[in-house]
Image (tube, rainbow, N blue to C red):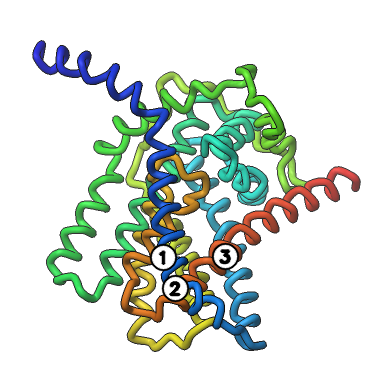
Amino acid sequence: MQLLAQLKGAIAPIVSRIKPYLRWLILGGTLFFLIHTLRQHWQDVAAIRIDGTGWGLLAIALLITLLAHVWAGWVWGWILEELGYDALGTWSVSAYLKTNIAKYLPGNVWHFYGRVMAATSVGVPLDGAAVSVVMEPLLMAIAALIVAFISNQRLNIWLQLIGLFIGLTLIHPSVMNPILKKLAAAKSKLKPGKSEPSGNTPSPSSLSPSSPLTSSPSPSPPPPPTEPATLKKYPLLPLIGELLFLVMRGAGFIGAVMALHPVEWGNVLPLLSAFSLAWMLGLVVPGAPGGIGVFEATALALLDGSLPSGILLGAVAFYRLVSTLAEALGAGLAWGADKALRQT
């Protein structure tokens, strides 16, 4: 144990020096890959033409993606309930949509900050709010792995079952609670009153919804817990919710592909598997706000050869546009509805 402590003490300064440059290394590597791929196939991309049916499919992909974000907000409310805090579904959807667009700000943490502040504003203790915003991406990542394994037809059935077993085991309270406690301790450092980003970066406090998207009374403040917020039971309902969220996001991606190129039924599951893995990496890899670059590079690498290169590049680009528009539209609708309710 003493040797491990000494080793950790020796490595920690090195990691702390490298960490500030890691995000730029990842971002630079993914951008280089994307630019190199685009240079090779720019003529194929320039030759893409979208007809009326294609634009209609992109509109459907936009609607499905928007609904997926609305659903994710509802599932976040379920997560708070699993932790023992009352949360109105309409409030959690409003708070989620208002803060989600902040993922594109430098640092890739301000959407979490906004949700923590939104939850504490309606009486959820800080540690419980921090645990909820840690648990949400963990469940999303595990759901993405489950969808990727199940929909990957190239994998042996036993590998799929093993992957499913590992994913289901990771979210058991006895496994997840220690992880949640450590990560929530780091997230809870984002407290009100800390210095805000300088320059033109929006104030994080502006990302915290001031009132629920509902005419019903706000949830009554729960009593302060006597111990740190933890899972009391297996989070089956939130997991099912995140699985549906991933399937909806995957359907939006497939819709973007279909807008440019016909997709046969036999290719639906491989597309869904590749999307889930690419989306998961975009979620967990540091240094890429909103997964920009990481998602695109991973999707291109996984689907290389399954679609014409130009079509694949165009589909990935259009899906990024669809995804960003859906998040912006969701935030705008939530703010508009909240403002209308305050005026009535």
Residue 240 place in picture, x, y as percent:
40, 59
Dot placed on the residue nearer the N-terminal end, 2 or 3: 2
Residue 336 left/right relative to 143: right
Badge 3: residue crowd in 10 Å (few <14, some 14–19, many ≥20):
many
- Of helix, strand and loop, which one carries label 3? helix
Amino acid identity at mark 1: Thr
Residue 37: mark: 1
Amino acid identity at mark 2: His
Residue 332 left/right relative to 326: right
Amino acid identity at mark 3: Thr
Q: Is mark 2 in CB contact (under 8 Å) with mark 1?
A: yes
Quadrant the N terminus occupies: top left
142 above or below 124? Answer: below
- Of helix, strand and loop, which one carries label 2? helix
The residue that appears at 37% across and 35% down in the rendered structure is 22
Badge 2: residue crowd in 10 Å (few <14, some 14–19, many ≥20):
some
- Of residue 62 and residue 312, the one placed in the foreground of this image is 312
- Of residue 21 and residue 241, the one placed in the foreground of this image is 21
The residue that appears at 60% across and 63% down in the rendered structure is 321
Q: Which residue is mark 3?
A: 65
Q: Nearer the viewer, mark 3 or mark 1?
A: 1
